[in-house]
Image (spheres, helix red, strand yellow):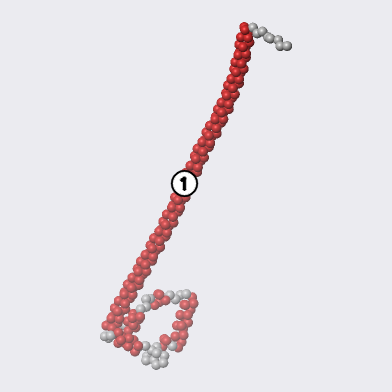
């Protein structure tokens, strides 16, 4: 048996309003939950973006620092190479300068030696010339004193007056043989042994032609 429920219209309206209010409340709760979730998601996204930006900034800073370091290393290497080039250049210049100085000194030494040799040769030639002049003058004087006209006659006159052991042309003087000669030799030997004999004082300057002159005077 069915029982008909009689519903008061006012109560029904109130009930419907209550249901609407409950539905609205549920929707508000859901909306609030969605809002919270959206906020958390945005916060996560913001945090992620901030972290990403921070990492990118750090990476940029690292790259800049690396570029600065590489640039400093490059400049340092350039300075080192430049100093090395300067050092090599200075050493090369020093070596060339030393070689040039050595070459100049060697050339100067050769010039001085050549000048010295030329001067010595000149002095020898002058001495030889003076010697020849003296010999010629002495020979001319000897020819004048001996009344001869040529050097051959002068030499022949000299050889004519020379005593040879195989065929003496002049008588040997008494002082050159016998007891007087032996005593003279002994005296000369004693002087030579005692160092009393000075040949420069005894003989003086001996010239070949001069001997001829003094011989025939």
The residue identified by callout 1 is: 78
> From this viewpoint, is residue 162 visible?
yes
Q: Is residue 18 left or right of residue 152?
A: right
> From this viewpoint, is residue 94 visible?
no
Q: Is residue 141 left or right of residue 108?
A: left
Whether 52 is drawn above or below 199: the answer is above
Q: Residues within 10 Å of mark 1 (few under 14, many from 20)?
A: few
Q: At x 71% / y 11%, what residue is drawn?
A: 2
Task: Determine the residue located farthest toward the right in the rendered image.
Answer: 1
**Which quadrant is the N terminus positioned in?**
top right
Q: Is residue 177 left or right of residue 19?
A: left
Which residue is nearer to you in this view: 131 or 13? Answer: 13
Which residue is nearer to you in this view: 151 or 5? Answer: 5
Task: Determine the residue located farthest toward the bottom in the rendered image.
Answer: 167
Q: Position of residue 139 (x, y in %)?
A: 30, 81
Q: Is residue 81 left or right of residue 34?
A: left
Which residue is nearer to you in this view: 81 or 212? Answer: 81
């Amino acid at each position: 048996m069915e029982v008909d429920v009689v519903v008061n219209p006012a109560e029904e309206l109130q009930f419907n309003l209550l249901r609407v209010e409950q539905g609205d409340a549920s929707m508000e709760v859901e909306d609030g939950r969605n809002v919270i979730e959206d906020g958390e998601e945005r916060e996560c996204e913001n945090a992620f973006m901030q972290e990403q930006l921070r990492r990118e900034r750090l990476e940029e800073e690292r790259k800049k620092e690396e570029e600065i370091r590489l640039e400093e290393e490059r400049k340092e290497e350039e300075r080192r190479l430049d100093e090395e080039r300067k050092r090599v250049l200075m050493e090369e210049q020093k070596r060339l300068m030393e070689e040039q100085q050595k070459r100049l000194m060697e050339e100067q030494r050769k010039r001085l030696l050549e000048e010295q040799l030329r001067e010595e040769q000149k002095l020898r030639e002058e001495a030889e010339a003076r010697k020849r002049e003296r010999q010629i003058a002495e020979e001319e004087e000897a020819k004048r004193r001996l009344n001869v006209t040529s050097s051959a006659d002068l030499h022949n006159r000299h050889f004519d007056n020379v005593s040879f052991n195989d065929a003496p042309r002049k008588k040997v003087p008494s002082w050159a043989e016998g007891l007087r000669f032996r005593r003279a030799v002994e005296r000369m030997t004693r002087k030579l042994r005692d160092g009393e004999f000075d040949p420069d004082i005894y003989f003086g300057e001996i010239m070949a032609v001069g001997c001829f002159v003094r011989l025939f005077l």
